[in-house]
Amino acid sequence: MATIDQMTNRVVVVGAGQAGFEVCAQLRALEMSGPIALISGETQLPYQRPPLSKAYLLGEMDLERLFFRPAAFYDDHNIDLHLGTDCLAIDRSTKQVRLGDGSTLEYDQLILATGARSIRLGETSGGDLDDVHYMRDLADADRIAKAVRADAKALVVGGGYIGLETAAVLAGIGMLVVVVEAAARILQRVASVQTSDFFRKLHQVHGVDIREDVMLQKLIATQEHITGAELSDGTKLSVDIVIVGIGVRPNQKLAEDAGLEIENGIKVDAQCRTSDPNIFAAGDCASFPHPDGQMRLESVGNAIDQGQLIAKVIMGQDMTYQPKPWFWSDQYDTKLQIAGLSNGHDIVVTRKTSPTAVSFWYYRQGQLIAVDAMNDPRAYMVGKRLIEGGISPDPEKVRNIEINLKELLG
């Protein structure tokens, strides 16, 4: 039974990404009838982010298909949208938030789903130039789409998933693309050597020049446009456009200014509550308790699960967050699906079922902890079920392609 007065309870959600939208939609699905306000600094209806660096940038998905729901959904479900205005401050003593348009909103429960922002290049490297782009939101994708052309030369700074997905799109439309990665290999922070090797070869086959263990030193520009780049090894490149994907930082200043506890983002407990019991946080901005310390997961799955959990907790359900990490990435004709977290693995088992379908299975002290599956949805689904069930199959059985994966579930 709910512990709130559903007729008068006021919920305010700051941030209209996946987590913020999920809170609102789930509250209404659970028949919470009190007022809900959803605040977004962007003028567009709440939308999904993953297609921005793929289908949307390629022009294969129009704007309306990005939206979680059409405008009528918010009217029909009595969700009060505040678009094009930021939340500037939280007054915890009066339980009010102050918006950029000068208005204030009172809350009984406040949810911070403020997301994360791109790490910027320093001005000394040329990070303030007009031809330097980032891929985080719709405005970023639109700017890049207007700037790209088939005969241009692109420099992608950062060999993580965002950088590689963008590189794949640019190469696909005929651009000459160079990717520079400061670490010893692409995807070093998030994947094994084997997965890095797979995607390095994939990009090289498509003509992308991958440079690892090298940094962007500075950009060279005329008064109006970038003309080149100098790398830390002394190499000089001819460049027309630069895309930067060197990571993100959680948007935590609003919470920090309000005196909430900060640790690797906005610190929350197992129910996604912050240090103020009336304020929750979810998504990329929130760090939750984990055996390895306060952890943030920058993924759609995490945002969905935390947003839905918060709604259920508000409605009186006694639940705790149990992370079930899953991720995906589309590059060229390859779909990567990831289940679990591979941090700390000591064994990687390879299962290759065709020249284009392979999966890597990560073990730590005999326990299966993660699976990377390239063009192998069955390996992903079985691996995900095994991890969630705490089942660790014999690595030799995983490696043996004569064995049907479904047998491992038994």
Image (cartoon, rainbow, N blue to C red):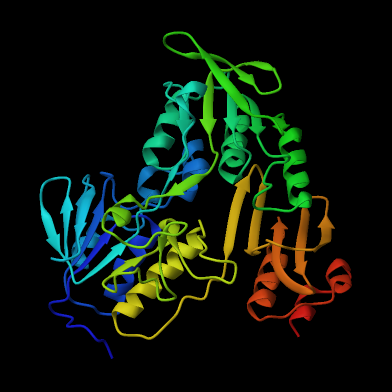
Q: Which of these two is toward me, 35 or 193?
A: 193
Q: Which of these two is toward me, 262 or 6?
A: 262
Q: Using residue 268 as the reference point, say whether residue 188 is left or right of it.
A: right
Residue 342 vs 249, above or below: the answer is: below
Which quadrant would residue 213 be assigned to in this image? top right
Q: Using residue 254 as the reference point, say whether residue 263 is left or right of it.
A: right
Instruction: Decide if residue 15 is in sight here.
Output: no
Q: Quadrant of the N terminus?
A: bottom left
Residue 72 vs 248, above or below: the answer is: below
Q: Quadrant of the C terminus?
A: bottom right
| Percent x, y of residue 47 | 37, 51
Q: Which of these two is toward me, 241 or 368?
A: 368
Q: Using residue 406 as the reference point, say whether residue 309 is left or right of it.
A: left
- Identify the residue at image location x=63%, y=39%: 159
- Identify the residue at image location x=26%, y=58%: 258
Instruction: Decide if residue 387 is in sight here.
Output: yes
| Percent x, y of residue 88 | 21, 49
- Identify the residue at image location x=47%, y=67%: 288
Which quadrant would residue 199 be assigned to in this image? top right
| Percent x, y of residue 380 | 68, 65
Which quadrant would residue 274 be assigned to in this image? bottom left
Q: Point out the residue furthest to the top here.
A: 222
Q: Point out the residue furthest to the bottom here.
A: 1
| Percent x, y of residue 25 | 31, 68
Q: Which of these two is toward me, 330 or 185?
A: 185
Q: Using residue 159 as the reference point, say whether residue 289 is left or right of it.
A: left
